[in-house]
Amino acid sequence: MDFRKFDGVIGGVERGVIEITKYIAAHGHQVVLLCKESRFSEVENLFEDVTNITFISLQVLTHVMSLRNAWIDSKTIQDIAEKTGADVIHFPYNWSFPLRKKVPTVLTVHDVIPFTFREAMGFFRNVFLYKPGIRQACRLNSMIATVSEFSKQDIVKKVGVPGDKIRVIPNGLREPLEPDENMDVSKKPQSLKEEMDAVEREVIRKTLLSCNWNQSQAARHLKISETNIRFKINQLGIRRDAQR
C-alpha cells in the first residue's frame, strides 16, 4: 500500500488508505505500508493497535508527479513487492508510473479535474504534465479504481480508458449525520444539488474568511487538496469581494 501522500493531515485519500489497510489486516492478510521517511513514526502511530502490517520508509519528500517518484513506482516499490511476496500494489492517488511491474497494480483515480476544469492546474502544468501524466498512469497500471459511476464515465470519455479496466468502489460516510434542529421545514425545498451546493459554499466561505482568504491554509483546515478548493471556489461562484 502506497502512503506517500500522507503529510500529517488525514483527508479523504488518507482516510481511505487507513480504512482499507485496517480492513485487509483485520482479515488476516499481511500489508506492507510505504510512507515518507519523515512521516514514518506518525504513520506507525496511526496503526499502533493493528497487527499484520510491515512499515517501510521511502526517501522522498513529496508524492507529486516527478521522475523521482516514477523511479520509485517502477523500481523501488516493485523490488519491495517482489521481496515481500506481495500479490498486488495499490497506488491510491490519481497517478503512478510503474514502467515495469513485478506484480499487478491498482491505481485509484478520484477525479479527472485536469480534463474537466483546466484552470485548476494552470495551462502549462495542465497541458504538459497532468493530462499526459494521468493518461500514462491509467495505461501503465493493471486496473483503475474510482469512486462513482460518474467518475468512471469521465475516465472512459476524457482519458480514454476502457470501461472494463475500471472498478467502481463508492465512498461511504465516516459518521452518521445528525438532524439539524434549526432547519426550517416550512421552506420550499430546492433541488438536492442546490441544497448541497449552498451548504458547501457556506462552509468554504467561512473557512476562507477565517484564513484571510489563504487558499492553502483553508484547504488544510478542510482536509482537501489545494487543487480541489480552487475548483470548488470557481464552481460555486465564491468571490472574495463578496465576503466583506
Image: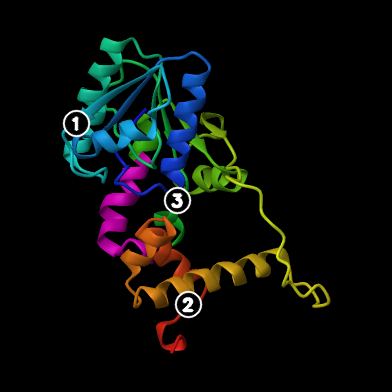
* Local SS, label 2: loop
> What x and y, as percent, mark residue 196?
63, 65
Magenta span: chief secondary structure: helix
Q: Give the Cα separation between the discs numbered 1 and 3.
A: 23 Å
Residue at 41 percent across and 33 percent down: it is: 107
In the picture, which quadrant includes the N terminus? top left
**Amino acid at dot 1:** Trp
Q: Is residue 34 in the magenta section? A: no
**Amino acid at dot 2:** Ile
Q: Residues within 10 Å of mark 2 (few under 14, many from 20)?
A: some
Nearer to us: label 2 or label 1: 2
Residue for badge 1? 71
Tag count in the figure?
3
Residue for badge 3? 112
* Local SS, label 3: loop
Front-most of 78 and 181? 181
Q: Give the Cα separation between the discs numbered 3 and 2.
A: 22 Å
**Amino acid at dot 3:** Val
Magenta stretch: give its range: 118-135
User: Which label number is shown at residue 238?
Assistant: 2
Q: Residues within 10 Å of mark 3 (few under 14, many from 20)?
A: some
**Are the two marked residues, 2 and 1, in contact with CB atoms closer than 8 angstroms?**
no
